[in-house]
Amino acid sequence: MNDFSDFATQTEGVDKPMVRFRHVSKRYGALTVLDDLNLDIAEGEKVSIIGPSGSGKTTVLRTLMTLETINSGVIYVDGKPLTHMAKGGKLIGADERYLCKMRTNIGMCFQHFNLFPHMTALQNCMEGPVHALRVPKAEARDRAEELLALVGMIEKKDQHPSRLSGGQQQRVAIARALAMRPKVMLFDEVTSALDPEVIGEVTNVIRKLVSEFKLTIIMVTHQMGFARDISDRVCFFFGGKIEEQGPPAQLFGNPQRERTQKFLSAVKDAD
Ligand code: ADP
Ligand code: MG
């Protein structure tokens, strides 16, 4: 039996990150996908995760969304354990009720937008607040309209997803995630499935979020220029670990590790 009492004390004190991975490992059978990962992200910090395919980037986000369980370590969100709950001074595995509560802190947008097909853009943005958070309908509608305006989709609020382009659907998906008032927003290659000419309308929405909101953002992306523009910090993943990290100017301009240099020159060649 693991004794997590040491982990519990680490969340106390002035240094309270919004997201904290402590010695997190995730395995699928013999394959180690996250390898003793340590990562702290401050409140309001914008962090981009880059790295080769299979290096564990999506898994980091999925464990934060509690879509995957972890094999060891602890993840904390806003000072509270996410994967575990405190009981009698110790941490034990979180139960479903606790996970449901903690999950509302986190919003996620995926490569494939997965809007509810039978609901309009507006209904998509009201569904979570009304049913999961029990927000009164009128208030949820006001908030949804405000967010649809923010992402430039207010004129299409009564359309169903099938009537919207990929870029428009992704913008509604961002509004839908924000409607839950998450403390942390996760973006996983949100422009990868889009036609090139609509990528800008989605990245511009994310740029706006970055400049106007004090949200904590973790973004997995293949768009190095975009990562450079919006991030406070870029983490280069390799083999389920952070191989190298730093401010964008440093990581892109003067990478120290050979693997980072190789990866960056390969993606540059592909452009
Ligand atoms: P990335 O997003 O960096 O491309 P992922 O985090 O999606 O990488 O995946 C990391 C590794 O874990 C990959 O080798 C992938 O094949 C493997 N993996 C992901 N999900 C599963 C699963 N459900 N079962 C088995 N292996 C998986
Ligand atoms: Mg991925």
Image (cartoon, grey):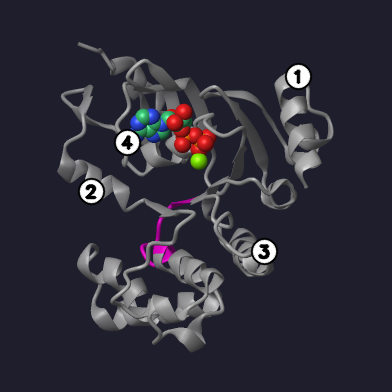
Residue at image position (35%, 80%) is 120
Residue 142: x, y in percent?
Answer: 38, 82
- Circle 1 is placed at which residue position? 258
Number of other residues with Cα within 10 Å of mark 2, as a class: few under 14, some 14 to 19, many 20 or more = few
Of residue 10 and residue 30, the one placed in the foreground of this image is: 30
Compared to 209, does 53 lie above or below? above
Residue at image position (28%, 17%) is 5
- Secondary structure found at label 2: helix
Which amino acid lies under the numbered mark 4 shown in the image of this protein?
A: Glu
Where residue 252 sits, quadrant-wise, is top right
Residue at image position (16%, 45%) is 97
Whether disc 4's CB lies below 8 Å from ligand 1 is answered yes
- Circle 2 is placed at which residue position? 100
Spatial separation of the CA atoms under disc 3 and disc 4 = 31 Å
| Circle 3/circle 4 CB separation < 8 Å | no
Residue 62, label in figure: none
- Secondary structure found at label 3: helix
Ranked by sequence position, the earlier of labels 1 and 2 is 2
Where residue 209 sits, quadrant-wise, is bottom right
Whether disc 1's CB lies below 8 Å from ligand 1 is answered no
Ranked by sequence position, the earlier of labels 1 and 3 is 3
Residue 213: x, y in percent?
Answer: 56, 61
Ranked by sequence position, the earlier of labels 4 and 1 is 4
Residue 68, label in figure: 4
Answer left or right for 92 relative to 26. Answer: left
Which amino acid lies under the numbered mark 2 shown in the image of this protein?
A: Cys
